[in-house]
Image (spheres, helix red, strand yellow):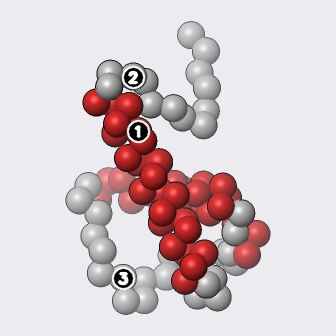
Amino acid sequence: MGQGQKKNKLLVPEANKAMYQFKYEMANEVGISNQIQGDYWGHISSRDCGAVGGAMVRRMIHQYQQGLAGQQPQTTTTTTI
């Protein structure tokens, strides 16, 4: 992943890999994953990058609110017991 001028730091550094995967999952949902070449996002428009960030925030807020309501958060994978 290119570092560039990135100044944001994760509060929980161990979550780096999960956040990286989450970003690409949201890019897929927004429909721009086919435009990303490797880890380079430099040619993606600010509007599209903002859409990915907005989708990430909406998903995180939704999961937090579900936790407050005592519900199980929705995930994209299913497990069978």
Crowd tier of the residue under label 1, counting other residues whose Cα lies within 10 Å: few below 14, some 14–19, many 20 or above: some
Q: Is residue 4 above or below residue 22?
A: below
Nearest-to-viewer mark from 2 and 3 = 2
Q: Is residue 63 among what the camera can see?
A: yes
Residue extending farthest to the right is 34
Q: Nearer the viewer, residue 47 or 33?
A: 47
Q: Provide residue 15's location: percent of width, then percent of height.
A: 36, 53
Residue 63: x %, y % from top left:
41, 39
Q: Nearer the viewer, mark 3 or mark 1?
A: 1
- Answer with mark 3 or mark 1, whichever residue precedes in sequence: 3
Q: Nearer the viewer, residue 55 or 2?
A: 55
The dot on residue 71 is: 2
Q: Does residue 58 appear to the left or right of 48 in the view shown?
A: left
Quadrant housing residue 73: top left
Estimate the spatial distance between the alpha carbons at disc 1 and disc 2, rounded to whole Å.
9 Å
Across and down, in percent, residue 54 comes to: 48, 63
Q: What kind of residue is marked 3?
A: Lys
Point out the tag, 2 or 3, that comes first from the N-terminus.
3
Q: Secondary structure at mark 2?
A: loop
Amino acid found under the numbered disc labelled 2: Gln
The disc at residue 63 is 1
Residue 6 numbered mark, or none: 3
